[in-house]
Image (spheres, coloured by chain):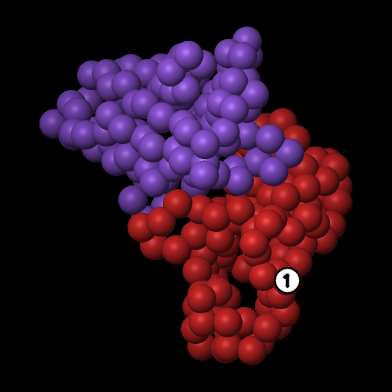
Amino acid sequence: QVQLVESGGGVVQPGRSLRLSCAASGFIFSSYGMHWVRQAPGKGLEWVALIWYDGSNKYYGDSVKGRFTVSRDNSKNTVYLQMNSLRAEDTAVYYCARDGIRVGDYWGQGTLVTVSS
Amino acid sequence: DIQMTQSPSTLSASVGDRVTITCRASQNISSWLAWYKQKPGKAPKLLIYKASNLETGVPSRFSGSGSGTEFTLTISSLQPDDFATYYCQEYNSDYTFGQGTKLEIK
């Protein structure tokens, strides 16, 4: 069965960096693009980034452009989100989700990132 | 950038009611729209993709319609498990989500 498991969240000071991971299993990972989506406490969903199946194209939401970088290692079935220059407003649960015509058909359980001094 | 506007923001209804949630796009997104259901503390769950296609395993009381800039999600007869927050998402270009509609028990 398809599984997406995020890790790497935690408490980090403003201006510091953090890298999230999303480990995939149960499907041909190298055939699918992958999204990162976040949700601040008590708020709605915000799309963060997309990486194509082969890593050849990457897209970002305006609020993270220039600070966050999405990457993937198809040999490890893992997608990453490198988050630099973190701000208080980046505090959120971060989810990875599978792309496709049935966009978001599978999601991870999320990992909480708290940016606080 | 595409803006997605959902209405209403909150909807109060009773078990057995028929409810409709609307999502409007600021520009033409063809049929590239998805609907999700989210319960507190849980990841979103895909209900409808490409505007009107029911995801596998989703009850048939859920349906989606629309194209271009106006879309609707309809639940034909509310069940207790349906009380949740619903989001639309365009995936024509920006992957923008609507702000959400909280469906509450009346």
Quadrant that contains the N terminus of chain B: top right
Of residue A66 and residue A5, the one placed in the foreground of this image is A5
Residue A10 image position (x, y, % from top left)? 21, 34
Q: Give me the residue at 75% from left, 66% from top.
A: B63
Q: Secondary structure at mark 1?
A: loop
Q: Residues within 10 Å of mark 1 (few under 14, many from 20)?
A: few
Residue B31 image position (x, y, % from top left)? 82, 46
Q: Give me the residue at 29% from left, 41% from top.
A: A112
**Image chain in purple:** A
Amino acid at pointer 1: Ser
Quadrant position of residue B32: top right
Q: Give me the residue at 58% from left, 88% from top.
A: B15
Residue A106 image position (x, y, % from top left)? 55, 44
Residue A21 image position (x, y, % from top left)? 37, 26
The colour with which the image depicts chain B is red
Of residue A108 and residue B29, the one placed in the foreground of this image is A108
Tell me if residue A112 can be seen. Answer: yes
Chain bearing mark 1: B
- The residue that mark 1 highlights is B60
